[in-house]
Image (tube, grey):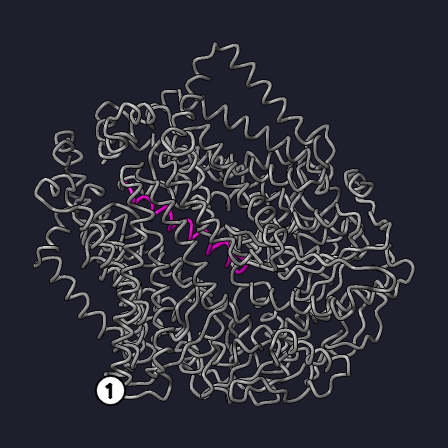
Amino acid sequence: MEAASVPARTTRTASLDAARRLVSHYGLIAVLMILPVAYGIHDLRVDGDLSRLGENLKDGVSNGAIWALVAIGYTLVYGIIELINFAHGEVFMLGSFVSFSFWSALGLTLASKGAGLLFGLLLTLIVAMVACGGLNVMIERVAYRPLRNAPKLAPLITAVGFSFILQNVGLEWLGGSQRGVDDLIKAQNDLFTIGGVHITHADVLAVAVTVPLVALLAWFVTRTRLGKAMRATAQDPEAARLMGVNVDTTISLTFLIGGMMAGAAGLIYALYQTTIWFFQGFQAGLIAFTAAVMGGIGNIQGAVLGGLIIGCIQQISDNRIGGEWTPAIVFAYLVLIMVFKPQGLLGEETREAG
Amino acid sequence: MSSAAATWRGLGDRIRELPRPVVWAIGAAVLVLLILLPFAYQPASGFIDDCVTALAYVVMALGLNIVVGFAGLLDLGYVAFYAIGAYVIGWYGSGFFAAIAGGKGLHVWAESAGALPGIHFNFLIVLVVAAVYAALAGMIIGLPTLRLRGDYIAIVTLAFGEITRVFAINGADIHPFGKDYPLTLGRQGITPIDPIDLPFVKQFDPLNLRPWYWFALAMVLVVLFVNFRLRDSRLGRAWIALREDEVAAASMGVPLVKTKLKAYATGAAFGGMSGAFLASYLNTVNADQFEFSFSIFVLAMIILGGLGSIWGVVLGAVALSFINSRLIPDVLNGVPHKVGLNFDLTELSFGIFGFLLVIMMVLRPEGLLPERRRQIELTEGVGGDETLYEARA
Amino acid sequence: MGLTACGGGGNGGGGGGKVSGSTLTVYSSLPLQGASRPQSQALVNGMKLAWERAGKKAGKFKINYVSLDDSTAQAGKWDPGQVSANARKAAQDDTTILYLGEFNSGASAISIPILNRAGIGQISPSNTAVGLTSNDPGAEPGEPQKYYPTGKRTYVRVVPKDTIQGAAIATVMKQEGCKKPYILNDKEVYGQGLASNAEQSLKAEGIPALGNEGWDPKAPNYRSVASKIAGKGADCVFLSGITDNNGVQLTKDIAAGVPNAKIYGPDGLCESAWADPKKGGMPTSIDSRVECTVATLDPDKYPPEGKKFFADYKAKYGEANPDPYAIYGYETMSLALDAIERAGDNGGDRAAVIRELFNTKDRQSVLGTYSIDVNGDTSITDYGLYKIDNGQIKFDRVVKAKGASA
């Protein structure tokens, strides 16, 4: 299809395209750097060092790590069946709920320490990942598979329907209020300080869980047979089927992995924020979807990058501009990035974005 | 399911096969029934209330259908136009700008407002202004999406919807035209809004819903007429060509930019008009109304009804609106009590709403009344819908 | 159907009217879905308790109580269309005598004009927006007249308006030695209104706030907001909002990010879901730095009536420390039944019951003794200051709001 559009171009549009490429290349970098550079200069003039900006970016990275894990679920599902899975945020929310209920059942409290705590949380992580992965597979079976050959937007509505149902499950589970949970890892206590930036337990946790998971996922997708089947299905389901790939299993697998990432994110979220509620998935889903698109939807590295960038924008805006404006700043950034790079930061010229 | 669907389709086909005068006669009879409907109920009846809301949603859904159903541009930020329409009447049809003209108020063709402070334009003027503002906003929102396709359009429109909401919430702190003239009143809400005031008719009243109903019905008829005319016009065919295959449409000489912007502007204008009407009817403009979930609500109406199908969209809007405002609160919530259970169903109602969405979509994936073009492809078994969307990609 | 015909006339002639028969209906209209559900549930519980304790009767009349929902499934919170529908439903019902609600001030702004035209009295358990009843500072131009198309007042409330609590908070902060206060608000009608009143009172006390900024209830956390406040050197932070707008997370993050600062909460936060970690509240480690104000007083100083309420509430719902909204709900219904009873044989006359509402003088209640003034506001100006001790909200002392006119 790209080939089809090339002959239509004249020399005038070619020079325009060259200008556009230039703008999209440097304009994008400029857009991304506006806030940090402006506030960096401001900090150097006022405070004399960059610790405040460093603090913002550090908070951004650790928050963004959670968004990244949720965004992976969006991007994987989108890559393979081109569906915006609106129920994904709710799967993440239930990940937090499962984690909290499970560790309470294990008897982890504020007094838990050391190896017992570590082991308990690892067990919780596994349980949350399995539960959310299974839930996501079930949703695919019930709500999306029957609509595989329906108009493309039909599953979008079943996704919305499921998101309402899961929110209601959350409401019945822990009630309508936000619920503070035990601060098992002393989330806001400092572990160490570098260059005036305080690194807290929560920051370390977010990065320490996200990095191995993303690395493992990248290895799985690029190196294993199943991962290759996933990529093949994403590129052309029909051809993959002809080559002997079981498309249904592969799609289930994709939902399983996406759900597992959301489950892990749910646990980190509960430990990191120490407050959970049935509506947390809605906003998280919106942010993670934005992150996935920003990075180039269908692209795992892009989702991670998008999550981290949004995390940083949020924290800088909370800290400098005011929390009430943060959602608008995040979305304004998204629009700018889309203007300069319509296929997302790391997106290729895919069928959708071509 | 397939047999039920076939019956529906058969019914549609049979109506189409009837001679034109018969179709017109049936249409006229239905219209007369609709006009007389309020007399079967009390003036402030809850049913008529739900009808008025449903009609206003039909206008919105028909507007969104132009963007998503005809032109194939997935818009997840439609709530922005609802907000703009609502704020237009908030600005030009209430006591919001009380300081204007030294507190004496500015009245244009609005006798019922008396000497109230604030700007009070006649509702018909407000309606036009709302349509124009929303159309302009539609084009502005459309601009950055011109180079985008598919779901990237979705996220950019969603972004604009959210930005609009944030401005609505924080607007009380923004004073573009001086201290006494904030942009919005945030979550406090601008209340009251002028009721509709038409020439030769008494000002509308919140305890008599009949005039509101007739006005909404008239709006729906006008919008329906415009929709049919547009669909069958050169522009309508350009939209559908764009939806089916953008590259092919461009090479056949369809001007992409103009065609897309016209779709955004027309769809937005309807949203703005409906927004102004709803604000007057609901008597408030509150930032809390303009959430992302409203965009999804309207989108669900048109997808459930049958994307691109005008009658399907009307049906979808009426169905979802009634499920939300009547079936769940008034019918289902009474059930546990009737069977003797002391159980409060309100805590399950949005789960029920979600469940109904899933069930309806799974049972009728192509919508309640699919678009004829699509229906033909489906019945002829040309690889179902895939052809449509694969071709577009 | 004389009522609706009257309304349909469009002149809004005051409606009113008498209920024939000996059964009257009291409606409540509250958001029973979504995030406000817990408070609404507490209000309904309180109302039901009062209704049942009175034997479902007032004077010689039998009372029906109908709880309406002003939220919708799609929105998950109060919805203007549903509010109007509820008000119209009450207006249409020939047996309606009083209407209790709404929970949100923005919603009451919609139902007051409709009920005012229909001549039905209304009591809100929770609205604090100044402009609904008076044009004191904080009201918008045209308020409150624009809500009362008949020119007659039909709306009263049992919670003090924002000006009173704002002044009380400022008084406490001054007393406790705050030098650089900072205000955060949740941008709701309640939170924002209270914040601007507190800001004015703080200025009057000579300790102007360093800032008054909104927080986003949907944000996952407030660490960067906290570090900004710490950077400005604030020593006291007033959180003007409600628990359900992420109040617990905000309190935790401010406590961690602004070390040593004292944290103050209004009655919207002062509840067990905020204070008690067992109910999802903040950790006990920060209890000593946190205080909150509520219009309710020391439970030990309550009149017998009030003490009985706590015992009954515990017996019925198993909670020793009811949510403040349960108390407001209880008092709203009690006041309604009391007004009907005081109207005597005219208890079925809507206008007579409204007159009795405004005639409320020195009423002994769970909230203390109060009267209703001509605007429909309560005369309560005393606020209880509460400390948090191991997750429990404990009464500390009475605060007189300085400079607040009742």
> Which of B54 and B204 lies nearest the eye of the viewer?
B54
Q: Quadrant of the C terminus of chain A?
A: top left
Tell me if mark 1 has few (under 14), some (14-19) or many (20+) residues whose alpha carbon lies within 10 angstroms of its own. few
Front residue of this view, candidates B4 and C378: B4
Per the rendered image, the range of residues in magenta is: B150-173
Residue for point 66% across, 29% down = B37
* Residue C13 horizontal/vertical position (percent): 83, 45
> What chain letter is assigned to the residue under label 1?
A
Kindly state the secondary structure of the residue where label 1 is placed: helix
Task: Point out residue A139 in the picture as x, y percentages from the top left corner.
Answer: 32, 52
Give the dominant element type of the magenta stretch: helix, strand or loop.
helix
Q: Is residue B391 above or below residue B14?
A: below
Quarter occupied by residue C396 = bottom right
According to the picture, the residue beneath numbered tag 1 turns out to be: A115
Can residue A346 be found in the magenta stretch?
no
In the figure, A211 relative to B370: above or below?
below
- Left or right, A353 with respect to C42, comes to left
Q: Position of residue A244 (x, y in %)?
A: 9, 44
